[in-house]
Image: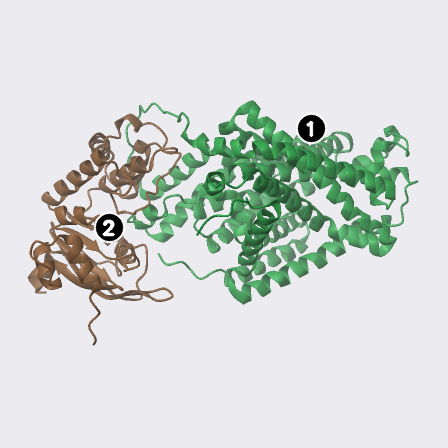
Amino acid sequence: MTASPSTPSLAWFARHEARIAWREWRAMVSAGGRRRTRTLVLALASFAIVMHLVAAMIVGPYAQVTVADHDALVAMTVTAVLAWCLVLSQAMESVTRAFYARADLDLILSSPARSRRVFMVRLAAVAGSVALMAMVMAAPFINVMAYRGGLRWLSSYLVILGLAAAASAGAMALTVGMFRAFGPRRTRLFAQIAAALIGAAFVIGLQVVAILTYGTLSRLALFQTGTISRSAPAADSGLWLPARAMLGDGLSLALVCGVGGGLLALAIAVFSRSFGSHATAAAGAAYGPRARRRRTRPFRSLAPVAALRRKEWTLLRRDVWLISQSLMQVLYLVPPALMLWLSYREGSGAMVVLVPVLVMIAGQLSGGLAWLAVSGEDAPDLVASAPVRTFDILRAKVEAVLGCVALVFLPFMLALGWVSPFHGVVATAGVLAAALSGIAIQIWFRAQARRSQFRRRQTASRLATLAEAVSSISWAGAGALAAAGSVLAVIPALIALLMLAGVRSLRPREMAA
Amino acid sequence: MTPCELSQAALDIRELVKRFDRPAVDGLDLTVRRGEFYALLGPNGAGKTTTLRMVAGLLQPDAGTIRVGGIDALADPVAAKRLVAWVPDEPMIYDKLTPLEYLEFVSGLWSVDAANAERQAGELIARLGLAPYANERCEGFSRGTRQKVALAGALIHDPRLIILDEPLTGLDAASARQVKQILRERVEAGDTVLMTTHILEVAERMADRIGVIARGRLLAEGTLAELQSLSGTAAGANLEDTFLALVAAPEEGP
């Protein structure tokens, strides 16, 4: 058989990538058979309905605003900037992942095909997936506005498309810039941190200003007071183009989409040229100089459980990249810390707000750490073949996770207990409940993976991810009500427990050994 | 097998069954004597690795018994695991630990006395040529170096039964010779080695007995001469000819 002299076209590569992506998605959705698919569909449908109800309560009253409403333009622009930051953060993560994913790179680069074409498709796919995710997240709000305020609001979908395209272009430029500035060994870590900071900075910044100014964690406080509106440019300023486009202004919409699409096309054209060399450099990064340790201390006699615990802590401590994965969650502790400090100084009653924030973050953080300890075991055969009971192995891992959670939250608990012993106890109980729930979910849904696949944990089991989120939210709700002294706290606590029981019954069949 | 022979068995497997979508191990009987170097050969998908993983306690059999050093490995897996070391074909070590830290961790899992473990670690590191890397993190190690670290981890707790799945894959000639020498010394010291390999020359040279497995069953076992006799190949035939003749033979009916 002789090979055709023509090389695969852009459309051929696009079809190939689309087929792989479609099959991965199908496998993810139907991985557990019909029963789990049905459960997943039901859960997603319920979630969509709840989100539409929430959206109706939050934005429903503003559906009739027009381009003449200055305050509305300000609020919508700020929302667009917030969304853009989050999309940029997501796009940076995706672009970095594309650079560092080996997968079929050797095959592509060693083939006579024009690799630039496949890289163009992959960069476009990054933009597409980021835009799709943003549109899905915004859909309940847009749909509610369109239902109540007219079809003009549907143009918001196109605005998101334009903003996502611009964010993807920015992410490509930033990531490639980092590659050139810091080299392949550091870029993954730096890009991860930058993405987390960009994603969180805007939200946290608003919260910090709101706390310092008005003593509340609400991100909307700043706008409700009119502080920004008074100092913002006039209604005809170009700054409000995205907001005007969202309200259905045709020219603004064309400009937003045109600029976004143009930037993306330019970025793809420019950066697809260097994609191959960056990916190759990323692949070779592991073979550079290795960290060398001077060993001075002798071996320690440790019981198996203690050895396992210490191993988990050492691996976590040494993997800065993995630590940065949790940075986003820990960053959100900054506003509560500030609020706690202000409460201590002023003796205000902010505890009711503080407790759920701490509980929520504890649930999410423990879930991530538990995945690393339980599923992200890089030497599963070694641990499973050791003369240690399975229960003791899990116990060691749970203790390791709880130790990390304690390290992060103990200062908060102590400070809270100092300010208000009752709220200290409530917060501690909530943090423990959320952390243990997160760990339990990860144990029930454990699936062996490399630690380096940490980012895929949320797509590996949608049910576990959803359960983790519902658990954290429920315990946070219970914490808030308990902190307010309400007996109604038992209701969200019961919801959390029932959900855990339900999720446990849906866990995959236990793997042998 | 007589009771006396059974008491001498490092590993005794009876009627072992494991099914996935099809039978992977199908009523396997296998006995490995103490102080023996036993090579398990078979074509791809014959059930070798599945068998070894069940012996190492990594996989639960559907039926059958496994006795390690006289201990029922299914009834008391922790006691059986104390005697066993398992080296998979794909070395699984921690990228962020150094070889010395890895060995310290393994000795902790097997509750080895610290002073003894440190002495053993020093010896193994030196024997396996790992001294230049002893304090470097394992990330970026070549496959062969990772394999040597994994092997050192398997030997540090002084196991009575060493189970190796393709242990020489990825090793250079000098390293392969070191590993073979270490395994031979262990056997001479009274330990038992059970190894799978596709390098028939290694099995031919090193193994006291060779077992040939196919479709989850033991087709034949014995010394090379016994296998030649069983397969009907000429006395001067090498193991490759003998092995191919054995696995190509049609299965006997019930």
> Which mark is drawn over residue B198?
2
Chain B drawn colour: brown
Measuring 32% from the left and 33% from the top, which residue is drawn there? B101
Q: Which picture quadrant has residue A168?
A: top right
Q: Which mark, by number, is residue A345?
A: 1
Q: Position of residue B25 (x, y in %)?
A: 28, 64
Separation of marks 1 and 2 at Cα, in angstroms: 73 Å
Left or right of A153? Residue A124 is left
The x and y percentages for residue B195 are 21, 50
Farthest right residue?
A68
Q: Are marks 1 and 2 in contact (CB under 8 Å)?
A: no
| Front position among marks 1 and 2 | 2
Judged left or right of residue A185, residue B181 is left
- Disc 2 chain ID: B
Specify the chain shown as green.
A
**To which quarter of the image does residue A10 belong?**
top right
Left or right of A309 in this view: A486: right
- Whether residue A302 is visible, yes or no, is no
Element carrying mark 2: loop
Looking at the image, the residue that sits furthest to the bottom is B254
Determine the secondary structure under disc 1: helix
Q: Residues within 10 Å of mark 2 (few under 14, many from 20)?
A: some
Q: Amino acid at mark 2?
A: His
| Image location of residue A55, percent across then percent down | 77, 52
Q: Residues within 10 Å of mark 1 (few under 14, many from 20)?
A: few
